[in-house]
Image: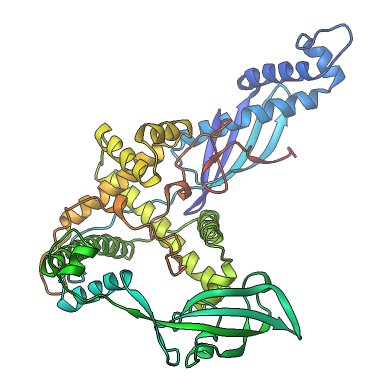
Amino acid sequence: MKSDVETLNPTRVKLTVEVGFDELKASLDGAYQRLGQRVQIPGFRRGKVPARILDQRVGRAAVLEDAVNDALPSLYAQAVREHELLPLGRPEVEVTELADNERLAFQAEVDVRPEVAVPDYEGLTVQVEDADVSEDDIETELTRLRERFASMSGVDRPAADGDFLALDLTAAADGQQLEGVEATGLTYQVGSGTMLEGMDDAVRGQQAGSTVTFSTTLLGEYEGRVADVTVTVSSIKEQVLPELDDEFAGLASEFDTIEQLREQIRTQLGNRREYDQQIQARDKVIEALLQRVELPLPESVIEAEVHARRHGIEEQLNGAQLSLSQYLSRQGQSEEQFDTELRERAETSLRSQFLLDAIAKAEQVVVSEEDLSAGVVQLAAQSGLPPEQYAQQLLQGGQIGEVVGQIAREKALATILERVPVTDASGRTVDTTQGEFADDQPTDDQPSESDQPSESDQPSESDQPSESDELDEGDQPAGDAQPTDSEPEQSPAS
C-alpha cells in the first residue's frame, strides 16, 4: 500500500491511498462468500456458487463494490497509523480509481487533532478569592437554617414580600376560560417571582378574600399566549422563625448549644471556600495557559460539542417540566444569546481538553492501575452504581480508554498547579495539593434549583473527541467525535 498525507489546514488533512489487487484478495474472497449466501442459483447450494458464476449472475461490478466497501475501513486505518494521525470525525472518502485486477485508489479527508505547543509555565501566577468566613456569613447560613424550621402564622394585613398566600387561579383569553389553567389552594410566596410574570405586583397589598385580575403571557400548554389571570387570595401567612438559642441548635443539628452550631457552620463554610479556591485555581491556570497558545478547532467538533451540551440541557429541563424557551424567558435571555454562550463554552471546553492532553504527553504522565481503580470508584459513586457494575459497563462500552484519558488530564493539571504560585486576594499562599480537582468539580451542566443550567469548562467524557485511528466495523470515527458503527462516507469511483 502507498499512502500520502496533505495538510489542508491545521485541523484537516487529506489522505491519498493506492493498493494493488493482491492486497484486496481477502476482501474479494469475502465478497464472493457473502454474495453467494444471498443469491439462490439453480444447481448450487448457498455459499457454494463458483466465482465465475456469480460474476455472470450478479455482475463483477457488484462483487468489486462489496469488496471495496469491506476493504476501505482497514485500509484507511492503516494509513492513519502510518502517518500517526489522530482523527476527530468521520472521513469523507472518494474512490478515485478502481481498475479491475490492477489497483484501487481513494482519497479521504478528515478532521484531526490540532498540534499543541505546550506553553511555558514560567512567570505564571494565579490569584483566587479569600476563604475567610465572616460573622455575617455565619448569620446568613443560620437564617437559611431557621427558615427550614420556620412555622406559619396567619396575619390580618395586606400581603407583603415574604408572605405565603393560598390562592385560587383561573385564566381567560378572548372572553373564554382556558382549560387546564386553573388551580385551587395554590401556595405562593410573594416576591419569589417563580410563577407568572406580573403575579407579584398583582397580589402584593391584597387582603385575604380579595380578588385581582392581571394580564400576562402564559407558559406551558398556552406558551406565548396573552391571557387575563384572575387570582383570589384565600389566606395570608407569614413565616415565623425559631429563636436562635440552644433549643434550636438541638432541633436543627446534633449539637447542644448555639455556639457549637456556629462553629460547625464556620468550619463547613471554610471547607467549602477552600474547595472553591481549588476550583478557581484550576480554572484560572487553564485560562492563563490557553491565552499563551494558538489552538484551532475543527468546526465539526465544535458543532458536535454544542449539540451534545444543548441536548443535555434540554433533557434536564424536560425533567423539570420546562421547555428551553420557558427557561430562556425566565432568564431574560434570547435563544441567540444562549446559543452564542453555549458555543463559547464548548470551544473553551475543547481547547482545555486538548491543552491538558498535550501537557500530559509532555510531562509523561502515567496512569497506574491504582489511579484507574480509584477513578472508577469515584465515577461509580457519582453514577450511583456499585464499582464492579460500573466497571463492567465501561468495559462493555469500550470506555476504559476515556476514563484513563480523564485521569491523565487531572494528573497533568495537578502537575501544573504544583509549579504555579497560587495566592488569595490577601496575598496568602494557597495550598493546591489538597484533593482531586477534576473528579470533584461541580457538575454545572444541570439546571440548579432555580432552573438555570450552565456549562462546565470541561466537556463530559461522553462528549469528548476520540483519539481512535481505526475505521473497522464498530470503531469508526463519527461526526460526533466518538467511534460509531457507521461506514465512511464515500463517493463512487470516477
Q: Position of residue 324 (x, y in %)?
A: 57, 67
Residue drawn at 48 percent across, 47 percent down: 112
In the depicted structure, whether residue 183 falls above or below residue 256: below
Q: Is residue 440 above or below residue 477?
A: below
Please state if 385 lies on the left or on the right of 23 as rendered: left
* Percent of width and height locating residue 73: 59, 32
Residue 18 seen in the current view = yes
Quadrant for residue 133, please give it.
bottom left
Q: Residue at x 53, y 58 (%)?
A: 319
Q: Nearer the viewer, residue 125 or 71?
A: 125
Report if residue 123 is visible in the image: no
Quadrant location, the N terminus:
top right
Extreme residue in the top direction: 43
Image point (79%, 26%), residue name: 62
Q: How many marks?
A: 0
When the figure is inspected, residue 11 is found, relative to residue 490, above or below; the finding is below
Q: Is residue 126 left or right of residue 316?
A: left
Q: Quadrant of residue 251?
A: bottom left
Image position, residue 368 (x, y; %): 26, 34
Q: Residue at x 46, y 41 (%)?
A: 85
Q: In the image, is 373 to the left or to the right of 217?
A: left
Residue 369 at x, y = what percent? 27, 32
The image quadrant that residue 289 belongs to is bottom left
Along the viewing direction, whichever of 480 and 178 lies nearer the viewer: 178
117 or 298, which is in the foreground? 298
